[in-house]
Amino acid sequence: MLKITFLGAGSTVFARNVLGDVMCTPALWECEIALYDIDAVRLEESYRILSAMNTAVNQGKALIRTYLGPENRKEALRGARFVVNAIQVGGYEPCTVLDFEIPKKYGLRQTIADTLGIGGIMRALRTIPVMEDFARDMEEVCPDALLLNYTNPMAMLTGYMLRYTGVKTVGLCHSVQVCTSTLLKELDMEDRLPGARDFIAGINHMAWLLRITDREGNDLYPEIRRRAREKNAQGGHPDMVRFDYIDKLGYYCTESSEHNAEYNCFYIKSRYPELIERFQIPLDEYPRRCVNQIAEWKEQSRNLLSQAELNHTRSREYASHIMEAIVTDTPYRIGGNVLNTGHIIEDFPQQACVEVPCLVDGAGIHPTYVGSLPPVLAAMNMTNINCQLLTIEAARTRKREDILRAVMLEPHTAAELSIDDMAKMVEELLEAHGDYMKMYR
């Protein structure tokens, strides 16, 4: 029987979406689903909700089992063909709070802090050791499994797994699927959406919409650039940063403005506080979301648990489509995060983790050659890639001096702080994280 293991199954809403998609896919109906988490309450809630969905969606054809804690992780993974990773090491408290509050003492403000910035670096450093444990188990009990990584920081975690473990891995994000539709809807160009074709490549959360045409093959960028410039001139909308990218760099990127506001040295600047209002930048956005999500989840959980059966419609998440393509050997196209082996994107080192179109079939994941990006886009990506590679190096060596080097090359941090303050901040963060960072000497 096909086995699918979900690591971080206490992420109930996301597990429901991904595994609900599996239950909506005939080729995957008769499978064993192994739910793994370290939180007994959340694991049990996920089990009950997914069991109700299993009954309603595919007549109970899936076999669902739970596995609690590291001592049972190896059994959860044993014989798996696909492993989905959706963990968050350290949770909202204490780690997310620390990632925001300590840098704030040094004058460093953030919005999301899960991909780059000092918050993204810290998140990678506490997550990679846990994923190393996953990798050791997978190499032993399911060496041929494909790891579908949904955990951020995507490029750092996926890049580490592909470079330093034997686990076949692809990184998956939600933003590629909705990039074109989001842009055209924001610019009142929805009539161009049916039949539109796009080509997207770059790095996770900063991949570029390189080409976009309508159903007749007409280039939509001239009209997009004109409308984006006009809309930003009017101001007061939540995608100001990405529309400024279109104006200054010539292209739109995949991830939201609140994310991209903190990936560079342009918008969050202590000497220019007026930029925050001008570009509608939501500082401390992720902690607010966490608080709201925790409150909303309690109510949503009660509602879901009260239902004996739960229906589901297959979503746009890539996971079930990848599994189906591999199991049935039916080609499917995704935007995947993979190593830049063979210089898929000519401008980047081969060690970089890139987000590019990939074909999936019975033989696995096949990245598409992209070639060179427009020079300014490659340069923007490299400011992030430099920090990503240095963070991966710090996770490998476990040395604090290597962590500082990664922080020194992080664009937003470098624009705001002196090296001395960076060093103090790093030491304070490492100490405050306690056991989550105990491996860094």
Image (tube, grey):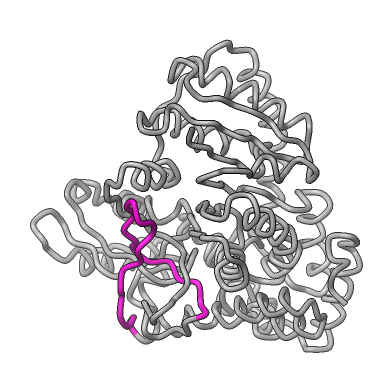
Residue 75 visible in this rendered orientation of the protein = yes
- Left or right: residue 36 compared with residue 334: right
Task: Give me the residue at 40% from left, 64% from top.
Answer: 232
Q: Nearer the viewer, residue 95 or 16?
A: 16
Task: Give how far across and how far down residue 218 sits, in percent.
Answer: 12, 63
Task: Give how far across and how far down residue 356 sits, in percent.
Answer: 37, 66
- Left or right: residue 213 compared with residue 402: left
Q: Is residue 77 above or below residue 284?
A: above
Task: Give how far across and how far down residue 337 sits, in percent.
Answer: 46, 64
Counting labels gives: 0
Q: Is residue 421 above or below residue 283?
A: below
Report which quarter residue 220 is drawn in.
Answer: bottom left
Q: Nearer the viewer, residue 328 or 354?
A: 328
Task: Give me the residue at 45% from left, 45% from top.
Answer: 319
Residue 277 visible in this rendered orientation of the protein = no
- Left or right: residue 72 compared with residue 314: right
Report which quarter residue 10 is drawn in.
Answer: top right
On-image quarter of the C terminus: bottom right
Q: Is residue 36 magenta?
A: no
Q: Is residue 322 above or below residue 436?
A: above
Task: Give how far across and how far down residue 312 sits, in percent.
Answer: 45, 25
Query: Which residue is at the far left?
Result: 216
Give the magenta range: 351-374
- Left or right: residue 120 compared with residue 427: left
Q: Nearer the viewer, residue 101 or 75?
A: 75
